Image: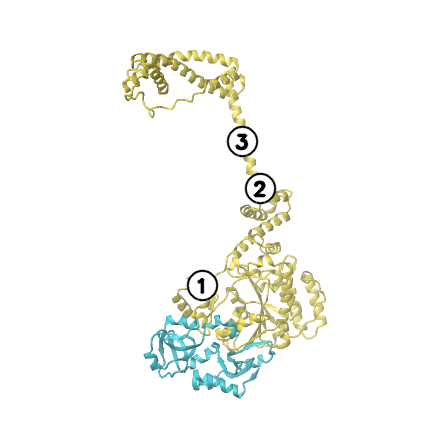
Amino acid sequence: MRPLTDEESKQFFEKLSKYIGDNVDVLIDRPDGKYCFRLSKDRVYYVRESVMKKAAHFGRPCLLSFGTCFGKFTHSSKFRLYITALDYLAPYAKYKVWLRPGAEQQFLYGNHVLKSGLGRITENTQQYQGVVVYSMKELPLGFGVAAKATADCRRADPMTIVVFHQADIGEFVRNEEELT
Amino acid sequence: MGRKINYDEKPKKGLGRKAKKQPPPEIPKKLQEQRRGVKKRRADDRKAKAKKIKLKPINDSESEIDENSIASELNMGLDSDDNSIEDKADDLFEGNSLSESEGPDGNGADRNENGKHKSSDSDDDDDDDDENEQDDDASDNDSDDLNDLSLEEASKRLVKKKAKIERQAEEEMQTNILDSERMHLPTAKELRRDQPDLIASRQRVKDILLVLGNFKARCEPGRKRKEYIRLLSKDLCFLYDYNEFLVQKLFDLFGTNVVEFLEANEQSRPLTIRTNTLKTRRRDLAKSLIERGINLEPIGAWSKVGLVITDTQSIPIGATPEYLAGHYMLQGASSFLPVMALAPQESEQILDMCAAPGGKTTYIGQLMKNTGCLVANDVNRDRARAVIGNIHRMGITNCVVSSVDGRKLPGMIKGFDRVLLDAPCSGTGVISKHSEVKSSKDGKDVQRCGHIQRELLLAAIDSCTASSVTGGYIVYSTCSVLVEENECVVQYALKRRNVKIVPTGLPFGNEGFTHFREYHFHPSMKLAMRYYPHLHNMDGFFVCKLKKFSNTIPKPPKEDLPETAEGDNEGEGEEEEMDTENKEAPKKKKKKSNKGMKKST
């Protein structure tokens, strides 16, 4: 377990800010304790300091996880955000997309969102903006990248992709090995 | 040219086929002669006399009657005087054949009359003979002298014979009833001879249980109790696919209720889920699941987060968007209980030693409301990863997941407020989920499990700290009903560490055993809780809450004998006294516990 290096931090926060913008500070300065990011086996964990101290008792082979895993640094040193970070992205998300009931299941299976499945989208969403995907009942389903700006979405063909799938909660069942 | 053939349609003569009445059966003459040969002379003489008397009047009267009736009905112009229509038909044919060449009616009628007379005589003779023969047959069985004796004496003898037969029949019936009331225990030979039969086995099980209910009165004389029990266990093994060891253990535990337990294991327990209070409320969750078409209801008054699914409508409960969002967890009802007994508080340090797959861990996490620190450990790395998945899904943020042998945990990290040990066991309480337990577990497995459980429990106690302000509790639970894995393990820990049993606080359940066959346990063992599938409709479970009152480890007891000897009441008292002599610091506390024990014994 070690703290993030500068480069790693830079990459990580850049990725995060795609989804939550400037709200990154909120994650660090929290009223209920001091939280920090730590790296263990290429995975970034977001954890309260007291919990981190307990985790330090365990050696690397024994320690599997602590706090919340946000994502992983790949071999080529790029950062990939996992669905497990959704709980922290969803409340601070700037750009949101709501899906129609029929398209929910499609998204949960890992497919991209088509125009026909799009219920609502926040105004002024730019192209390739990180978005958090919700169901109509305000249940966070995952996150993705907007394929088209809001205006373009309105004009688009029903079969065109409007949101690229990045992560969804169905991965807890589909893709458990990778997450854990 | 040949004879002239008459092609005219002959008028139908006689009453017709269907107007006939069936005559009495005619016995051919050959047989009649044989029968006659059997009878005695006196009988023959009497018969001959009787015939002569009978013959005359019958012929005259009958012939007159027949003439009139037939002539009026059929207008045949024949002067027939025969008894039966069959005879008449025969005569007519005879008559016809004779009269073919000659003219109709006139001559034929005369001939018919003659023929009929003859045939009627012979028929009458036949009939009379038949009647007489029947009577003679009946009377043949009686004594030959019946015919000679007077009627009175004959009737008396008949009555006596009847009475004798009835008496014999009654006695037979009585003996049959007695035999059926008392169960006959088949011997080994008989068993080998018979084919294994489900229905017979089932009946035998019922019978044996009945006999065992009141052995002295109902047992077969000369057969021992052991034999009944042995046969019962064999039948149960055959009926329910268990191995002998397990059936014997279960019979020791449940006695005559063992069949209910075995039957309950054949069916699955109801599906239950636990609401994740960090993300939703039970009411809202129930609403959204009902909208999806799932029928559910609250699990009972004893839990505020449990829901039991009554009908899924083929919707996968483990794949709904609510499940994926972490609003609920699939968990057996009995798994709620150890966590309820543990009662984790906010801002505490809690350890879950055998956490996989993470149901109890996430329950603890939600009760803590993500404050404090929760350490979840499981020796199996792959299963520990399931814990990680569940933790992230349910939104638990204060958890550390490790994969270490539980026995080595105290060496790495100590000072927990509460510890939960849901120990690995033989699984006799979850046979309904894992039917391979029925046949695969035997004495060695149980012993091995017991050994690991003892070591784990000691490690759990060592990880906990007695100086905790709010805690100092250890909860030991297993999904097994066997005493060797439950009370014996706790008893072992009671002797080797400074812990005492405290009430679990659970609202229902059976008490733990304070003694069981050759074992004797501490009297406070009745504060532990046992759960059975056939009584509580949840998996078999054992929960025991311990409180640590001192961090020092007492010296191990000098006896290293197996559990049974250590479990003696006398042995306990002696050991306690010896320990107090040796120790210094926890002396007072030990004495207190000693006093407690003495009082209760």
Q: Residue furthest bottom?
A: A6
Disc number placed over residue B182 in the picture, else none = 2
Q: Give whichever of discs 1 and 3 has the lower sequence position.
A: 3
Alpha carbon separation for disc pair 1 and 3: 61 Å
Q: Give me the residue at 62% from left, 49% from top.
A: B230
Rate crowding at label 2 as few (under 14), some (14 to 19) or many (20 or more) other CA atoms within 10 Å. some
Residue B75 drawn above or below residue B221:
above
Q: Are marks 1 and 3 in contact (CB under 8 Å)?
A: no
Residue B439 drawn above or below residue B6:
below
Q: Give whichever of discs 3 and 2 has the lower sequence position.
A: 3
> Residue B203 location in percent, x, y?
54, 46
Please identify which colour was used for chain B in the image.
yellow
Labels 1 and 3 share a subunit = yes
Q: Give whichever of discs 2 and 1 has the lower sequence position.
A: 2
In the rendered image, is residue A52 in sight? yes
Labels 2, 1: front one: 1
| Left or right of residue A116, residue B476 in this image | right
Residue assigned mark 3:
B169
Disc number placed over residue B309 in the picture, else none = 1
Please identify which colour was used for chain A in the image.
cyan
